[in-house]
């Protein structure tokens, strides 16, 4: 309590009185619910000591929560290892090992001090190197809440270029380490994305499902922030799903006052040059002025927030390497500011954590306004839209997506094959390497493309090492399951038609492993040198195939790697969670060979005019081309008699000096330049596929492709090396122009899950002053973008994250590649040049799948196809003829680990070994509420009898990241301004009938027993 | 022992075998003296645990002593306080408080670690702020030798611009703190001047007398270093006095291998970017390459040294703010390098200290070559002579010298008056403030002039605060001693003829306090406005006086301060260690006034031709001027009939772009430009003084002055503001050209004590390749410089430290002022512009005293006069008429604290309060051996009965810094190559007959009792 009688008249500080928020904004006064509060308090303090350890606050004062923290990028200007060890400090001074070395003794020395730590990728490494005495001390600090883990993912993932599958995995990886190391007290209560450059709604939804009580972030549009400060809407409830029943995806979300930095002039890290507090006899003594400044700063900040609690984030990038500087000065700050209470000051400053702050906000018992949309795009000033990174480093973005695909395959086969997968005939298989590499790659300077080149190389190298370790695992598993120790070959350059085995062997096996819970079809395409092949399926039936020449585009991309002349194409399919094995043999038909040679000669000299293809067509679609320009002109859905003029062109935005960079997109003109007004084209047409090859320039081409039976048009674009010898950076987009009346609206997915409506030059929560007609309308496209009118919808699926927009009605575009000559001054300090191994710029190849359908039918199309895109079948090749795995073991040419196929709306999101006797399973409803008449229905699955490879002996439902039992997950119930959403009582789990609601993900830990020799427990 | 059987074949490091020094250089083998060694070992380990704590070395290996250290400038780019607190880190990141905070826990955590600390000015501040628990822990570390104090002065003083009086005082101040705080274990065994820019011989002599066993430094001429490395003469015995009986001034001196920095690539401070040692599984793992590099580096370094021990200085400026970085990596270095011993490596690396290293060198029992000269000037590359700082900031250099003068007066009066001096009628008197300020000012970036301007201002401010506190003390003491509480006035602007009291009062007292042990005469010169005054001496006798007009030079310098029109001049004298009080009264003589007015009018329009003075003359000297140019032309010693043409002119060196700076002197031409070819002159002549005013330019003038009875010519030069609007910096020298045949030789003093012979373009210890004909021949002149032929000597005394040289035979010059437009890239980052309060450059005034005499008589002249220059009488003024101090106390108009005058050759170097019941006394023989027939004789003083103000009740002789009893002072006896100098047994002290040998300083602590009311113990 403040006592004026003890006031010291020598202290001249201005006394700032805390003005409580007006009662208008404070429904607590009208609606106190003390019983409810007590109950929740009890729940919140489940980790016994955590809340007891929260420092005392003063009810009648403004409480300033100092949050000591460090932000440790899991790679950015330096690699993860360089950051951990403090190597290459010439690039950036940063050494995480020293940060933890430094902070722990400070905490041990003084029980009032607090620290939060976030990035488990680093903490885990440090922990590994500590002696048991240090570990014990840290456990004690954690159990007392003095060291608090926040967020707790392996990294702090990006939100714009990430896919929900990998986001969940990386959070699971980090949180599992904390749970196993520190138990319940190591479970973070708050999510903490202080640095990512914009915030997706799906991220908030996932955080809610992970059990977080609240979420804090630092970066949002500068206009948005100003508006929120004024409206006191810096803290809200984010209703992050349009499908999930509130409050399942409700997340209390706070915008931090100053990004994640301390207030101006109050940074006491070794990196800062702010004045230390000198309270000694010295000319440098600055106590009075600093205390006065602090009180003013706190009062100003309190005006933007609703309670008598505010936070100050005391830390920043890689700070606390010498924690003494921070703590010594904060100790003095606390002492001198709080001493002012004797003079009537009503400001109380204390060491705190996000959890303790969150708890004070909750106790305030206010009702909070709701947020429904997301925080994209992010601009930190006029013309400064961070929308370039949606596309930056497109090759790495694809490699990351593909790596997730392979990790899921690796996880599944580890779970299905059991211990033999890890120790088998091919050596030590290990999914951990790829799991960690993928988790690292989710970092907001990794898949985002905003890291330095050498760091991007390191991320890729880590993924490649993960592939290597998983390939051993997959080989072990496939040999065990199939019964044959084949020389399994993983051809990772199929996208440029390179595979030594298929090029040279006269016969080989093609194993198509399908990670989905339903049977899929797939057009296998392999580089060969022969002219004629026969293909047989697992049952020995002949499968039709075609051999087409490798295009000039591919030859150019491939450069000196590989010299396959042709590609063998055949349609294949694989059973759910299983594989089919095909056999390919070269046949020597002289006739065929000479015919082919003729065709190659013809195609080598395509003639644009006379030979220009007018159309391609299969049973579902017809695609028309402009005979003069060679450009795509119209798409027709033959099934539904929809015909839509679609003008598609690759176009490039020149980059004006200093504008676009790794983060920022800022074209020098609103109307981009066409790469070429017309394309040189030629046609490849056979029973299996029809392809129009469009050559726009020496560095930009596209294949428009229709496979037999496909309901979509595939555009395979190849862009690069983007020339820069004209002194201009370039950003290449693929634009679709249609006659659809779209009313300024378009639709993009959020991290591959729910769809958000976008409106051009508009933001839902403030009156936008648009400064960039193009860049200011770009949004992340993780898997799909579409435009529609009342009847028809044109949907594009992507194979990686890209930026996309609709800058005019009926128009839709995706940025596919970018190469820039200037740094954009957001820290990376390099232009996004991506020199590549040939030093002239990367060539990037990718695919857009185009659906034209009715609005009501579209979701069913794109949901299923998008799932097949990110969980595509894995091709494994082998020369064949390998010995039996076990003597006398039967060869399995086809295999499924499921007893029955899953319904189309159910996705087996996760199947992975958890520990030697249990597996982690996630089932997901892959439709949104109401988007598909068939797809969006609730659906029930018999989980107990789903798998054939093992028997589930017990089943525990968990929260999304499996660090809490589902029934124990009791998040704080924040009261929305619209009225409290009553939490539904959670029904007891019925393993025979697990029901999924639209967009629901249910997570299980299953204890299992392997059932047979083909799956698991195989002896060596 | 190394064991090849345990060699690990996976370790590919090159095994470097240590090659022992050749036996030629190692007389140990022929001359082992084990008994002697044991004895010395015992002596050396007097601080019981210190040597036990030295880490084990390996006799058969190359031992690499890692010396963790930090170098903390006591002001440079930032002020002392800013460095201590870590304020203004925008200028330079440096915070000493954090360094000590950080190092101590590291030492506490691991008994193998070592650290040395040097600058007590900082340590003392830190210690003051520590809790008792921390103090206890530090005491323990010190007692175990884990934290070792080295050097231990208040600062690491400069050696080129410092005076021995202040050097001894600052060392005493620091070492006393250590002694009182840590006892014998806190007594540094090694001197450590790693940064000063050249090394004076007197410094080494003083270090020897302070009891140091050895001395290490970092900077020496690059050619010298190369030569020493090649000759293995990096370590020698420095015979640092030509007068003192060896080994009293012998000092084992080592040149550090790499300045004071770690080897290239092995800096692990937060300021460095060298790779940390990564011995974990990581792409960053660098153990093998780093260990290999270290072994190569150690082997290369060992080639330059003579034993199987070498040092690496692991630290640098303000390092160890985060000690963990250093220690964590050194731990790994030690571990991995020493592990290589299993593979046959013969390198052993260990944490160590200078003391432990020194002990190993001593144990090697070699004989060492001798060094007789000094290490000036310092060049770190061709054309890069650090000789500019000998003169940089001449105004501050004078203020520092004057402050020493006042500090000694303050010290003496504190000791003489007793407690009343500290608490008396004028308030709390305190000599500590000035003592510390002076100690700080000795720092090698303080009085050196190499600090930033704002730091120079801070040094001056500290001195001024010291003056304030001492003035109170002096007033208290004078009131107590004299019996009158006068309103004592200290006019500190007499050099520009400003003193409000004397200007306005019609009558006032002038108290002349003489700090010397012999009676001195002094020409008092006071600014007045009146035209006629009468002056009476303490006995009431009239003293002749003259009133002369204030010169235009002074009016210009004074600018808007003061408006005295005249100066009153009268000859005064004061008894030894006492004062005389004179009374001055204005008399109103109309006649006199009108006569004066006439004279002023005449002088106001000096005419160069007709009126040009031809000569001035007193009983001893005649000075002739060129009637055409007005320049000094000839000096005649009338007593000895010596006549010497002396051409004197002020000349300026223009500064070429980027050459000269605060540190470096590099004129753009060897032959400087004259400021003016002729001077405008006028003459002032009366019975007391004859003055020729020479005006060279608007910013350069000089008064050539002869007081009646003076044996020297006084040149009072006034230089500034040096114009720079021509875009050229300038360095102004005063050059004397004579016809003396000097054979390239000239003579300069070392820190105001012994004289060193200098030879143009020559160095005594290596074959000089001269790159700068002027700057490369500059040497520090702290008090005097002279040239001579076989008969005659021309000596110049300075009133501050300056650079000086003889760049041609018969020529001698002193640089008096410099103003430069470019930084010289040695770190200070500012051009030496010295803007001053008027922002156009400082005006500096000073005096050169010129003696022309025979060689054999000169020393007696310059020794006594130089003493009177740095210990000049202190003028204290008062209006008079103050009340009695004690009721009825007799007024003392004259006072001496000595029972008898000291002989001319004895200097009372120190008389200062030590503690309430004792005083510190230093007696010094002020002549060198053989330089003066009379002066250089041994002399005996009755110390017991010397003082009248107090009775000495006991007397203890101490070493020079009073941190050891004289008889306990047993330094390591290093064996010179010329044969061991047998240490003379030290005779028991006879207080009645203290004999001083030439240049000897003897230091005593005397317990005293005050004897009477006039001195000490006075009641208030």
Image (cartoon, coloured by chain):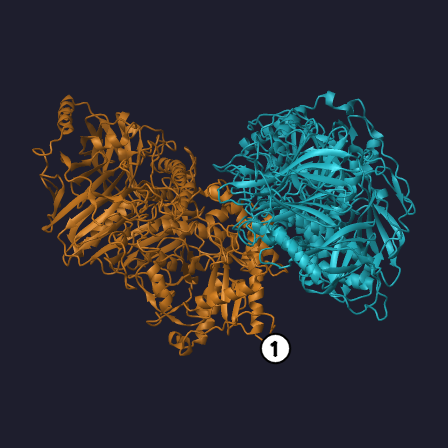
Chain colours: A orange, B cyan
Q: Looking at the rendering, which quadrant does residue B417 occupy?
A: bottom right
> Is A520 in front, or is B1006?
B1006
State whether residue A632 is above or below residue A840: below
Q: Which residue is mark 1?
A: A5
Q: Quadrant of the N terminus of chain B?
A: top right
Q: Is residue A748 left or right of residue B712?
A: left
* Residue B637 or residue B176, whichever sits in front: B637
The front one of A622 and B645 is B645
Chain bearing tag 1 is: A
Percent position (x, y) of residue A425? 41, 33
Q: Is residue B68 left or right of residue A614?
A: right
Picture residue at 33% right of the left edge, 47% below the top? A389
Identify the image quadrant of residue A1010.
Answer: top left
In x, y percent, where is residue B210? 77, 42
Q: In this rendering, does residue B239 appear at all?
A: no
Query: Which residue reaches farthest left?
Result: A610
Quarter of the image where the C terminus of chain B is located: bottom right
Badge 1 marks a residue whose secondary structure is helix
Residue A194 pos. (x, y %): 42, 55
- Count of all numbered marks drawn on residues in the image: 1
Density class for disc 1 (Cα within 10 Å; few <14, some 14-19, many ≥20) is few
B237 or B852, which lies in front? B852
Is residue A949 toward the left or the right of residue B555 in the image?
A: left
Inspect this view and state whether residue B10 appears.
Answer: yes
- Could you tell whether A219 is left or right of B878 in the image? left
> Residue B119 appears at what percent x and percent y?
67, 47
Q: Residue at x 67, y 56 (%)?
A: B596
């Amino acid at each position: 309590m403040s006592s004026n009688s003890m006031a010291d008249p020598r202290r001249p500080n201005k006394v700032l009185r805390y003005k409580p928020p007006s009662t208008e904004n404070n429904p607590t006064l009208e609606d106190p619910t003390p019983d409810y509060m007590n109950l929740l308090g009890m729940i919140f303090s489940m980790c016994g000591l955590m809340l007891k350890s929260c420092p005392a606050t003063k009810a009648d004062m403004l409480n300033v929560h100092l949050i000591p923290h460090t932000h440790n990028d899991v790679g950015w200007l330096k690699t993860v290892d360089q950051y951990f060890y403090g190597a290459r400090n010439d690039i950036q001074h940063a050494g995480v090992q020293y940060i933890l070395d430094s902070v722990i003794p400070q905490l041990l020395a003084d029980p009032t001090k607090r620290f939060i730590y976030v990035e488990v990728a680093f903490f885990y490494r440090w922990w590994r190197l500590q002696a048991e005495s240090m570990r014990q001390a840290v456990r004690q600090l954690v159990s007392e809440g003095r060291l608090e883990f926040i967020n707790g993912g392996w990294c702090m993932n990006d939100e714009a270029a990430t896919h929900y599958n990998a986001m969940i995995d990386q959070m699971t990886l980090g949180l599992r380490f904390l749970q196993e190391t520190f138990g319940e007290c190591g479970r973070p209560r708050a999510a903490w994305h202080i640095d990512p450059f914009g915030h997706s709604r799906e991220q908030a939804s996932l955080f809610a499902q992970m059990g977080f009580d609240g979420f804090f972030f630092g970066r949002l549009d500068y206009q948005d922030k100003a508006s929120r400060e004024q409206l006191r809407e810096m803290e809200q409830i984010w209703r992050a799903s349009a499908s999930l029943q509130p409050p399942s995806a409700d997340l209390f979300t706070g915008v931090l006052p100053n990004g994640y930095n301390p207030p101006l002039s109050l940074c006491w890290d070794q990196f800062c040059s702010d004045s230390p507090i000198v309270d000694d006899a010295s000319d440098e003594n600055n106590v009075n002025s600093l205390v006065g400044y602090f009180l003013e700063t706190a009062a100003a900040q309190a005006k933007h927030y609703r309670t008598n609690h505010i936070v100050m984030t005391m830390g920043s990038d890689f700070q606390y390497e010498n924690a003494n500087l921070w703590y010594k000065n904060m100790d003095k700050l606390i002492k001198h500011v709080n001493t002012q209470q004797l003079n009537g000051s009503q400001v109380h400053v204390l060491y705190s954590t996000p959890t303790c702050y969150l708890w004070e906000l909750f106790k305030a018992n206010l009702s909070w306004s709701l947020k429904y949309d997301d925080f994209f795009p992010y601009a930190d000033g006029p013309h400064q839209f961070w929308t370039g990174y949606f596309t930056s480093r497109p090759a790495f973005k694809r490699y990351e997506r593909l790596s997730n695909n392979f990790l899921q395959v690796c996880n599944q086969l580890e779970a299905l094959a059991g211990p033999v997968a890890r120790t088998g005939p091919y050596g030590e298989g290990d999914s951990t390497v790829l799991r960690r590499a993928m988790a690292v790659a989710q970092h907001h300077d990794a898949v985002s493309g905003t890291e330095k080149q050498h760091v991007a190389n390191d991320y890729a190298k880590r993924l490649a090492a993960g592939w290597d370790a998983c390939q051993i695992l997959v080989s072990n598993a496939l040999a065990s399951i199939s019964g044959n120790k084949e020389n399994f070959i993983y051809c990772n350059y199929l996208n440029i038609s390179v595979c030594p085995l298929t090029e040279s062997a006269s016969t080989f096996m093609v194993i198509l492993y399908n990670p989905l819970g339903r049977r899929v079809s797939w057009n296998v395409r392999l580089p060969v040198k022969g002219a004629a092949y026969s293909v047989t399926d697992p049952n020995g039936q002949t499968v039709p195939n075609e051999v087409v020449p490798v295009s000039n585009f591919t030859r150019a991309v491939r450069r000196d790697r590989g010299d396959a002349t042709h590609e063998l194409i055949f349609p294949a399919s694989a059973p759910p969670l299983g594989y089919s094995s095909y056999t390919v043999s070269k046949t020597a038909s002289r006739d065929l060979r000479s015919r082919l040679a003729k065709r190659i000669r013809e195609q080598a000299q395509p003639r644009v005019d006379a030979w220009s293809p007018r159309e391609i067509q299969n049973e579902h679609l017809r695609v028309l081309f402009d005979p003069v320009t060679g450009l795509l002109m119209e798409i027709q859905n033959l099934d539904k008699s929809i015909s839509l003029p679609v003008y598609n062109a690759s176009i490039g935005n020149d980059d004006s000096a200093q504008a676009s960079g790794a983060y920022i997109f800022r074209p020098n003109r609103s109307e981009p330049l066409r790469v070429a007004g017309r394309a040189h084209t030629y046609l490849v047409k056979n029973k299996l596929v029809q392809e129009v090859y469009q050559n726009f320039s020496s560095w930009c081409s596209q294949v428009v492709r229709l496979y037999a039976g496909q309901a979509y048009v595939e555009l395979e674009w190849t862009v690069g090396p983007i020339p820069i010898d004209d002194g201009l950076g370039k950003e290449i987009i693929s634009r679709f122009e249609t006659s659809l009346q779209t009313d300024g609206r378009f639709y993009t997915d959020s991290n591959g899950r729910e769809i958000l409506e976008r409106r051009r030059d508009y933001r839902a929560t403030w009156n936008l002053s648009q400064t960039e007609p193009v860049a200011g309308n770009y949004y992340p496209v993780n898997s799909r973008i579409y435009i529609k009118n009342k009847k028809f919808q044109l949907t594009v699926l992507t194979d990686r994250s890209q930026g996309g927009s609709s800058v005019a009605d009926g128009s839709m575009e995706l940025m596919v590649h970018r190469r820039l000559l200037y740094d954009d001054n957001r820290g990376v300090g390099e232009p996004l040049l991506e020199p590549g191994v040939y030093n002239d710029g990367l060539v990037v190849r990718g695919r857009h799948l185009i659906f034209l359908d009715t609005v009501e039918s579209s979701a069913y199309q794109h949901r299923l196809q998008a799932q097949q895109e990110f969980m595509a079948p894995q091709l494994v090749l082998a020369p064949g003829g390998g010995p039996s795995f076990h003597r006398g073991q039967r060869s399995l040419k086809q295999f499924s680990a499921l007893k029955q196929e899953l319904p189309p709306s159910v996705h087996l999101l996760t199947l992975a070994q958890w520990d030697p006797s249990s597996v982690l399973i996630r089932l997901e409803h892959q439709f949104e509420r109401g988007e598909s008449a068939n797809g969006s229905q609730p659906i029930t699955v018999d989980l107990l009898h789903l798998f054939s490879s093992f028997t589930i002996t017990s089943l525990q439902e968990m929260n999304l990241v499996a660090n809490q039992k589902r029934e124990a997950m009791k998040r704080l119930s924040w009261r929305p301004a619209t009225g409290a959403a009553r939490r539904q009582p959670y029904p007891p789990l019925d393993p025979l009938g697990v029901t999924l609601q639209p967009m629901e993900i249910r997570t299980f830990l299953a204890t299992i027993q392997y059932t047979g020799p083909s799956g698991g427990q195989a002896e060596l």
